[in-house]
Image (cartoon, rainbow, N blue to C red):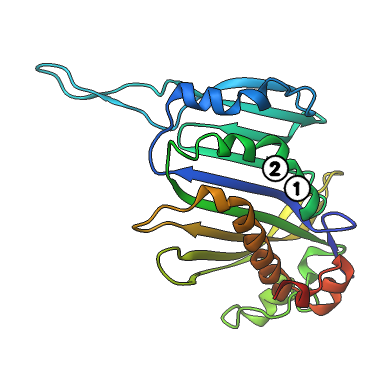
Amino acid sequence: MTWKPRHEAHAIERVRVLFAFREPVPAKVVSRSSAEITAKFSELGFNSVEPVEGSVATIKLQPNAAPEREPAARNGLVMRRHKDSVIAEEVGFRDLVYGYMTTTYGRWEAMRRRLDEVLLPALDHVIDIVELDSMKLEYWDSFIFEGDPSKADISDLLAFVDPSIPEDVLRGSSAWHSHSGWFEGEEPFPVLINRNLDMVDRKDNEGRTVRALGVYTLVEKRSSADALDIGSARSSLDEMHNRSLLLFGNTISAEYREQLGIDLEAYK
């Protein structure tokens, strides 16, 4: 039996890009910066655009009374595209973070073009107003074992395995998890790397129990004393994608890299 990637051309279930700010963006600025995009949400393929609550809940002080937390005000907008009644794509413009998520990923070049349509122009409009605290690029990949879950040997799929996990577990006797993370690069902009492996049982579309390996990769560029440069967001995203793909490619075996069309030399 073999492992089957999520899709024929790739194993990606979901991708997310997040730009987090150092301080909340005023509601009027959020609305103004995203106006050109949200005004043509239908033309861009989205089903809806709706107001959402902001990220920051304020504290109200009253005489002779304990502080009260006020509910977060509506201070953002979100566009959503649905496929089979499930969210397939989402763009959010919130006071502390602008972000994009899709479950219909094709290739990076196509996603970059999509980001240039639905997210990055709004980021350009706040470049002189707020400072960028971090940039995140997250991938969720998955593989399904075609066979008895108790015989889901991971050795053919992964390039290496965590030596602390018992051999019988790696051969399929039970679920397991292996999470790791580290920092790369130098100050003032350290890069956080996460690579999480989660072997779990779940139901397939026909209700059968199958063994699945989830691979989560995170590349997060962080600020320190200095804020990140919003103007270089596009080039930073390309660099983060290359690092993410290199990380994922080095995680799986050469056989599966070839099956998915991953050439590691192109991303070094």
Residue 127 placed where, x, y %? Answer: 50, 40
Mark 2: amino acid: Leu
- Mark 1 = which residue? 111
Residue beneath the point at 90% across and 57% down: 8
- Residue 59 lies left or right of residue 79; in this view the side is left
Mark 1: amino acid: Met
- Marks 2/1 in contact by CB < 8 Å: the verdict is yes
Residue 15 placed where, x, y %? Answer: 69, 49
The quadrant of the image that shows the C terminus is bottom right
- Residue 62 lies left or right of residue 249; in this view the side is left
- Under tag 2, what secondary structure? helix
Q: Which mark is residue 231?
A: none
How far apart are labels 2 and 1 at the CA level? Answer: 6 Å
Q: Which mark is residue 115?
A: 2
- Under tag 1, what secondary structure? helix
- Residue 205 position by quadrant: top right
- Crowding at mark 1 (Cα within 10 Å: few <14, some 14-19, many 20+): some
Who is closer to the viewer here, 79 or 110?
110
Who is closer to the viewer here, 235 or 16?
235
Residue beneath the point at 70% across and 41% down: 116
Residue 40 placed where, x, y %? Answer: 73, 22
- Crowding at mark 2 (Cα within 10 Å: few <14, some 14-19, many 20+): some
Report the residue that reaches farthest toward the left. Answer: 64
* Whether residue 201 is situated above or below residue 73 in the rendered picture: below
The quadrant of the image that shows the N terminus is bottom right
